[in-house]
Amino acid sequence: MKQSHQLILAALIRGQSFGLEIAERVKSSSNGRHELGQATLYPALRELEAGGLLHSWEEQAPGIRGGRPRRYYSLTALGSAAAMEEREAALGLWGLLLPGGAR
């Protein structure tokens, strides 16, 4: 799975969100090590949705009137399972790399 896809799935484990907020979650949770620009973020979101891992819908942003609706994304059951598999794989890898992790 592409790194951008892994990062997006991990960001959405915390709950539904819209594109720019997903990018902020990725940046924040990685302490700035990973940033997803629009040219990476939105094609990745479309690919994940086409693969059945995400569901999206348009909704007016709370507190903002007269603007364009935002597209929100959430994990599907398949997406949640994939996100947890990626998380477990990453934790397993780090367990092997950290001192005392592999016995």
Image (cartoon, grey):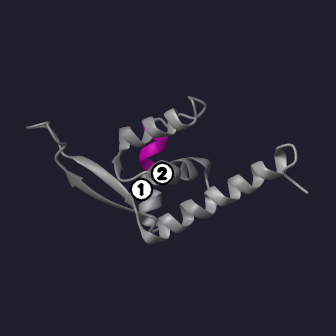
Q: Which residue lies furthest to the top in this view?
A: 32
The residue that mark 1 highlights is 46
Q: Is residue 93 left or right of residue 29?
A: right
Q: How crowded is mark 2: few (under 14 residues within 10 Å), some or many (20 or more)?
A: some
The quadrant the C terminus occupies is bottom right
**Residue 17 image point, x, y percent:** 34, 48
Q: Which amino acid does label 2 sit on?
A: Ala
| 53 inside magenta stretch | no
**Residue 60 image point, x, y percent:** 16, 47
Span of residues in magenta: 38-43
The residue that mark 2 highlights is 44
Q: In which quarter of the image is residue 85?
A: bottom right
Q: Which residue lies furthest to the right in this view?
A: 103
**Residue 21 image point, x, y percent:** 37, 39
Q: Which amino acid does label 1 sit on?
A: Arg
Q: How many marks?
A: 2
| 40 inside magenta stretch | yes
Q: In this view, does 28 lie to the left or right of 71?
A: right
